[in-house]
Image (spheres, rainbow, N blue to C red):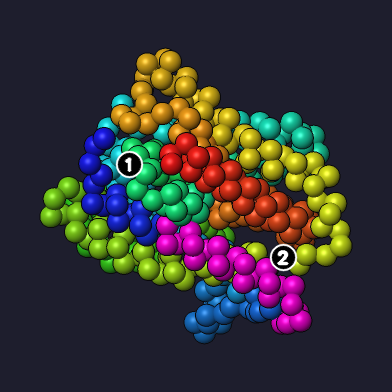
Amino acid sequence: MNRLSKSFINFFQKEQSTGILLILCTLISLIIANSPVQIFYLELWEIPVRLQFGDFNFFNFHGKPLTFETFINEALMAVFFLSVGLEIKREIYAGELANLKKALLPIMGALGGMIIPAFIYMLFNYGTQTQSGAGIPMATDIAFALGVLSLLGKRVPGALKVFLTALAVIDDFGAIVVIALFYTQDLSVLHLSIALMIWGVLLFLNKVKIYSLIPYLVGGIFMWYFMLNSGVHATISGVLLAFAIPFQKGEKKVNFSKLQHSLHRPVNYIILPLFALANTAIVVNSDIQNIFTQRYSQGIFFGLFLGKPLGIMLFSILACVGKISKLPEGVLWKQMLGVGFLGGIGFTMSIFITLLAFDPISQQYYINHAKFIILTTSLCSAFVGYFYLKKILF
């Protein structure tokens, strides 16, 4: 087994602690949302967020003030996507995705883990008003998945940890592409053009080797604003900014590494917990028993719980049979199946796509129930993956 890099070990440890924190925040939010202070708690997330410069309100979403919840989902999550983008870029330049031969296995696994769940969802929902939710079961929550894997301790082969991490990183990238292509509404060509022009300027600064972070961060703020008003989800600006920031091996990568390190604490210990609290405030009422009979619920459940492991295994086997890649040393197919079940832990990205897939006014019913199914399915996937891996590893 190859020795794990220090940067990978640090990343793995950070993600497992974040996963535990997100679980706690989810439980707290569910309890409070169904407690005597329910109304106060739900209204808390609807408080308007304003930042005035004279008559200009910077946080203005399509002519309407942002609420606290929308501010988290549109603004703070852009910072999360910046962090994700930086991690993807680091993996491509100097991590587990730098070697194409090694990267092809998690790439194929992630591809299957997106295509098969979406296909299963569409089997239940094609031609209905909920077919827009096909992207919901496509995503894996990297923090939760690695958090569960970490509970198994040192018996987990290092190569298996690397595979799951690379798989989840590629999965995140795939989810980002899906969001950009399929969840864009009321497109404003003018605002989108300005945002892309700003990105072009930042890419030019990268090309001429401007390593100071200041112009990139300032440009990123303006790019976010115009992306927010373009109809393309504003969080995409975080990923675009990440790919504009220069990455160089050796001493020149210091600014890139500093930014990535400085984002760790606010993203993992403030932004993601706030996202979990705001988006899992689900009121469990008498009609909750009818959720599992709905097509979109069945599509999400079977897409995540069965589609993920099926897609990851099928495409990984095809990659090995086709000899474009091979299993990492010390890893068995039965262990890969366990990782496939952990891939069914959707949570953050699945909930995020749910908010884009359904209309928050006319389809709030779908959103609340989809969140509940995502939590339920993620819990099932976590339990099955954990106990299956525990049985074969111990």
The boundaries of the magenta stretch are 16-40
- Quarter of the figure with the N terminus: top left
Residue 254, placed above or below residue 156: below
- Quarter of the figure with the C terminus: top left
CA distance separating discs 2 and 1: 37 Å
| Residue name at image x 51 percent, y 28 percent | 313
**Residue 4, x across and y down, in percent:** 25, 44
Quick one: SS at disc 2?
loop
Residue where numbered disc 1 is placed: 158
Say if the magenta span includes residue 185.
no
**Residue 244, x across and y down, in percent:** 33, 51
Left or right: residue 140 compared with residue 250: right
- The outermost residue toward the left is 251
**Residue 326, x across and y down, in percent:** 36, 23
- Give the image quarter of residue 169: top left
- The outermost residue toward the top is 322
| Residue name at image x 12 percent, y 55 percent | 251
In front: 284, or 335? 335
| Residue name at image x 67 percent, y 68 percent | 30
Answer few, some or many: residues within 10 Å of disc 1's Cα (few below 14, many 20 plus, some between 14 and 19).
some
Residue where numbered disc 2 is placed: 282
